[in-house]
Amino acid sequence: MLIFILKRILSTIPVMAVVALVVFLLLRLSPGDPAAVIAGDYATAEQIAKIRIQLGLDQPIYAQFVSWILRLLHGDLGVSIFSNLPVSTLIAQRVEPTTMLALTTIVFSIVVAVPLGVLAAAKAGTWIDRAVMVFAVVGFSVPVFVLGYFFIYGFAIGLRWFPVQGYRSPFDSPADFLAHIALPTVALSAIFIALIARITRASVLEILEEDYIRTARAKGQVERKVLLVHALGNAAVPIVTVIGLGIAALIGGVVVTESVFNIPGLGRLVVDAILKRDYPIIQGLILLFSLVYIVLNLVIDIAYTLLDPRIRY
Amino acid sequence: MKLTRRSFVGGTLAAPFLAKSGFGQARGSVLRVIPHADLKNIDPIWTTAYISRNHGYMVYDALFAMDQNLKPQPQMVDKWETSADGKTWTFVLRDGLSFHDGKPVTAEDCAASLKRWGKRDAMGQAMFGAVESVSGRDAKTLEIKLTRPYGLLIDSIAKISSNVPFIMPKAIAETDPFKQIESAVGSGPFVFQKAEWVPGSKVVYTKFAGYVPRKEPTSGAAGAKIAKVDRVEWLYIPDPTTCMNALMSGEVDYYEQVPGDLAPVLAKAPGVKIEVLDPIGSQGMVRFNHLVAPTNNVLVRRAIMRAVSQKDALAAAVGNPDYYKECLSIYPCGSPLEAKTGEELVYPSSLDEAKKLLKEANYAGEKLVILQPTDIPITSAFALVVGKACRDIGMNVDVQAMDWSSITSRRAKKEPVDQGGWNMFPTWWIGGDLLNPMSNASLVADPAKAWPGWPTDPKLEELRTAFANASGAEAQKKAAADIQARAIEIGTAVNMGIFFVPVGYRDNVKGMIPSPVQFFWNMEKVSA
Amino acid sequence: MTEAAESERETGIVATRPRSARRLAAHTLVMLGIAIMAVMVLAALFAPLLWTGDPLGLNPLQRLRPPSAANWLGTDQFGRDLWTRTVYGARVSLTVGVAVAALSISIGLVTGLVAGYIRVLDAVVMRVMDGVMAIPGVLLAIAMVSLSGASRLTVIVAITVPEIPRVVRLVRAVVLTVREEPYVEAAIGAGTRLPLILIRHVLPNCIPPLIVQATYVCASAMLTEAILSFLGAGTPPEIPSWGNMMAEGRAFFPIAPRIVLFPGVALALTILAVNVLGDGLRDRLDPKIAKRM
């Protein structure tokens, strides 16, 4: 088991190298020039050139790549071209809102979707089942921002139950935190509730057909207990798989949700940076996201062994 | 079923903060503002960005400032005089001026700040062309020695908009003008709280207790600058609908630039007021590339200028007629140098006249590339309207959409269109930047120094020099009128007219200053 | 949505219900999906004939008008007719969806075959695929569009790239399984050349899951195009796509929500239809499920 973990960690390195290379090349070959944007409207060509030298953008590409990697290995993510603040500071400022949003989304999705999926499986073939499944498909067909606008309109402006925008830290005020995070979480969860409900339903149904369930039923155990204890336990693995695969989608959704609800998180930071060509931020953040994705998948693989004794590495 | 569960939860959650008045109302006086842009960097000399200029006005002070009639008034200066030959200017600073770190402001600080400004700013460069030395004769006396008399000296250092010659401590002002300063220590009415700055989201200023305001009443950028709130927070929200919603629900107090279409909705909302604070407005402009075909032909440029209707352009870009006005003068209508010369060349707009000009120009179907900024709504619309007008007169138009960052790099290119060049791009200026021909970057006609577009016209340059040397209001007005006539004649840009951007605020906010630039001193929140 | 298909394949878990009631209901749903798809495709193909005007036609004096006889869905902020733009928008959105699906499937197929069959390249290819998968798709797409400027082609390529790794994994998995089959070993033993083996034995097994995957990729691509446009990195706004119509219209949501709503509903319906179609195809084509029906 330990060997497995070690092997997985080692295999992360070439993957991260690929990510680093892809990201770096993508940006440096871009036609947008931060030096020109920074220099401003009145700048002459020499002034722009001076700024490029200061930003180190005049070096050949491989030299820039090497110096970036070297700094990276020292934990130095560089300095934002525009705000002149260290990238690590910018990330630290914004890690909390994004992490909180992601966590509440995952928790909320599981809490809502699993019972829904079980319900649909229990009432398979009836209109309840149909309704849940249709609702699920709708969940990942409607773009997050459309859902977001509707929620703001209905619940924040119309009914005034929730604030319109913004983020409050749970460490400052849990009540404020919940109020502000509610609508973004629900909007973002739609797609995950859909996915998790479907997979829960499918896996519960399949397991219901298994022999040992029939045995349990034959023995006369109560229907509900049969469902919950046996079926759900075995459905855990596929659900966890979906969550793992959904992390990448979560990041995409977070970016849009932060934009609509004005949450000052990493998603907005990276989109703003991409549009402004603030290379250090873009490189640092995409690397960070990829690292998180890889680590989370490793954690999930380990979680498999805990959830399903049959899975061994 | 699920809905009821959520509504119950919603109701319970809502209770604690509905109990407070509005969501997250502050203790102590805090002014929550939605700024028109994100403060990307804090050096108002290094960049011309308006948001950095606004930041500058919070934390810095200047020697002179424009009042609401756009006349320069002393601000940090107490008295000043010129020598008989006009070549030596002496300024004495007011008492009590100090920086946020407690150190007093000295003339040497002022000298260093002016020099740094003079290296980047266009009007400053023009002024320093006549300057022999700038230095502090003693702690409170600043001396500027000129090589020849320069009538625009006070106007230059009283400049209201980018770049403003803010006064910084000498050590900071000695930073290379092509590098960003790191510290925002100044002598202005507010202090920048760097530790609380979250770029892209939040900027925080607190009142500077040690600021000594002038005795005169507030007027434009001049007069008494009294901070009437303890704390100002700039909360950048990119989505206009979210901004509007936040103002309506009371989560913010002030919305600096309300899109014209949303203004009527906000005006009707309870507790919200809409007002236009900038009497001069902003001017839209679509700039020609004078180096590249087909816009290198003056008749083609004039044809396009004749084809574009300001009315259509403003209606498309701004929408609400309360917030725009047609104005053919290069110097904004209502400003001192407003002129009517040259108008007959472009007004009234006429597709037929334009087609005639195009024919005279022997236009042979060359591709016309118009750059369209996708992230700036008003100028994006200008690009589309001009594109349509050009198509209507039979030109072969290619509107290329990209974000503003890309446009700023693309417009630096001088190659022909098929090698990645461009013919036209739209932009806008606040009227305050266009008041005279020296601060108007689009009128520079010396290709070595010109702003992208690179018009080449020795005659226009002569006229500009004549303006700089003109003495007295009459001579200046005539010189300015001549410049406008020539500029329209050679087609420096298409003038898209004037538009006004209203501000939105909660009705308990008072003390807004009518001015082309947003100021936050004098503003306060009275108890409801 | 591709995650669901992926996970269902990986976990080998499959949906079942009482046979007859389900088949009827599923059949209806799939037919509905096909019907909606057909409407959208026809709208895209025959746009100029559907009582539409000029999708680029600015008419500033008619801006933000509500629905009327002249403008069935009203006008947008430039006075352009919303009915026209929504119908024409189908073209871009569908083109992007289909093109991304076609491109990602073909590139993924070739790469997957290579990786699955040629052991030496397998490790390298899979590491690269893992690397690309680790980068969040939306961010990679935005970066690529910003790189080469916004155009339909760039957007298509930018959305395709993050979709390729999943296809590769799918194909590779099939190749690895098929390769072990006795009849394939026999064929190799008999001296059949590689291309023939691929075409005759491997390919037919790949096709069904690939078709299913293609529908999911198409739906996902249309959604991603909308997100890219929303964030400011999508298809150029002059030519309408449902995504960029919504992005431009969001500033006017309080006064004219229809600018966002009409393309939004059209997009949601189309994505829904494609997903349902994908479900139906999977039920029919995936041998594991087909057996149970």
Image (cartoon, coloured by chain):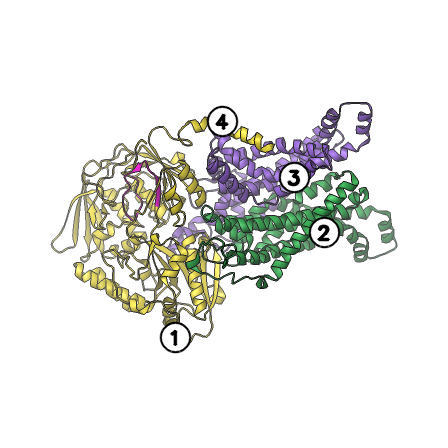
Chain colours: A purple, B yellow, C green
Q: Which amino acid does label 2 sit on?
A: Ile
Image location of residue C174, percent across then percent down: 76, 47
Spatial separation of the CA atoms under disc 2 and disc 3: 20 Å
Query: Taking B394 as reference, is C278 left or right?
Result: right
Q: For the residues marked 2 and 4, what is the alpha-carbon distance in whole angstroms?
A: 48 Å
- Looking at the image, is C30 positioned above or below residue B231? below
Q: Are labels 2 and 1 on one chain?
A: no
Query: Would you say the residues marked 3 and 1 are in contact, meaning their CB atoms lie under 8 Å apart?
Result: no
Q: In which quarter of the image is residue B461?
A: bottom left
**Label 2: few (<14), some (14–19) or many (≥20) C-alpha neighbours in 10 Å:** some
The stretch in magenta equals B503-520
Of the residues under marks 4 and 3, which one precedes in the sequence? 4
Q: Look at 66% across and 32% down and name the residue there.
A: A114
Residue C5 placement (x, y as % from top left): 70, 43
Q: Is mark 4 on a helix, strand or loop?
A: helix
Residue annotated with mark 1: B356
Pointer 4: what residue? Answer: A174
Task: Evaluate whether label 3 is on the same chain as label 1.
Answer: no
Query: In the picture shown, does residue B295 fall above or below C268?
Result: below
Disc 3 sits on a residue from what chain?
Answer: A
Marks 4/3: CA–CA distance? 29 Å
In the displayed structure, does residue A218 sit left or right of residue A35? Answer: right
- Reading the image, the residue beneath label 3 is A195
